[in-house]
Image (cartoon, grey):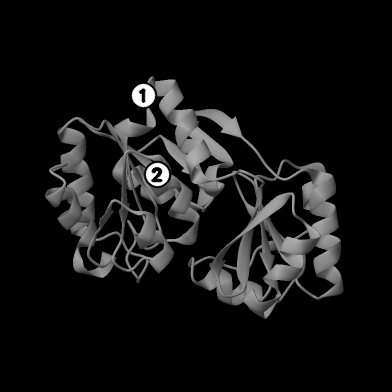
Amino acid sequence: MKKILFFDVDGTLYNSEKILPDSAKEALFEARRNGYELAIATGRGPFMIQSLLEELDINTYVTFNGQYVVYRGEVVYTNGVEKDELAKIIAFGEVRNEPVVFLDDKRMIASVGNNDMVVESLNTLKYQYPTIDSTYYMQNDVYQTLIFMEEKDEHLYREAFPNVQFVRWHRYSCDILPKGGSKAVGIEKILKKMGLSLNDAIAFGDGINDIEMLQAVGTGVAMGNGHERVKAVATHVADHVDEDGLAKIMRKLKII
């Protein structure tokens, strides 16, 4: 029997209106009553999921795509792109008028103000424009940095900076991750603390940043609204998140 469930947030727990459906909430609570531990695995930062953690009474989570990992309220792993490497990426983007947003565990900070790409991207997360400090990363630990550029220009960054990953989550934005960083790495840290193997975990996701996670765990579930590349690596494909897909697949897998 699998012992822990990892849930992505946007497009998996949250529907297309960024709301947690009652059916999903009830399914998670029933899974907990059935003996499963619940955990979040998201590209968002801890401060961006605080209300969700409280609503679901969850204190184990992988955030920033594996860069900030907490097990039962204790930080067990952190990672991030080296400051020197980040400085080079930022300088490369400045010349092209492509800004960044820095995130730590408590806040997000933008390198410039009033940028349309930043506005549109963060609006999809229902998040307001951050305060501005272009040198924030120099004096603070930054666990995630977002770069804002169009998909057609992404190859320029990949070619210039082969030591990091650019993981796209919006038509105008990519997460910048250390090479090898992923939700799967964060999940491994939690499972090690629990004395469990990857085979003991089930993960649910829909985005490109969920691919490694779904491939790594014993059972990987892609949402029906997910990217085709995500569905291709999943062991199961659920219905659309807006059609109670999460609760239905949890029932099908006899988790509830």
111 left or right of 40? right
Residue type, mark 2 in image? Ile
* Residue linked to disc 1: 196
Is 46 left, or right, of 26 in this rendering?
right
* Residue at mark 1 to residue at mark 2: CA–CA distance: 17 Å
235 relative position to 153: left or right:
left
Report if residue 115 is visible in the image: yes
- Residue at (45, 36) in percent of width and height: 187
Q: Quadrant of the C terminus?
A: top left
Q: Secondary structure at mark 1?
A: loop
Name which quarter of the figure residue 108 lies in: bottom right
Which quarter of the figure has residue 112?
A: bottom right
Q: Which mark is residue 40?
A: 2
Tag in front: 1 or 2: 1
Label 1 or label 2, whichever comes before in sequence order:
2
Q: Nearer the viewer, residue 62 or 136?
A: 62
Give the x, y percent position of residue 155. Answer: 70, 69
Residue 114 position (above or below residue 32): below
**Mark 1: few/some/many CA within 10 Å (<14, 14-19, 20+):** some
Secondary structure at numbered mark 2: strand
Tell me, yes or no, if residue 72 can be seen here: no
Q: Is residue 248 above or below residue 56?
A: below
Q: Looking at the rendered structure, which numbered label has been put on residue 49?
A: none
Image quarter of the N terminus: top left
Residue 77 horizontal/vertical position (percent): 57, 31
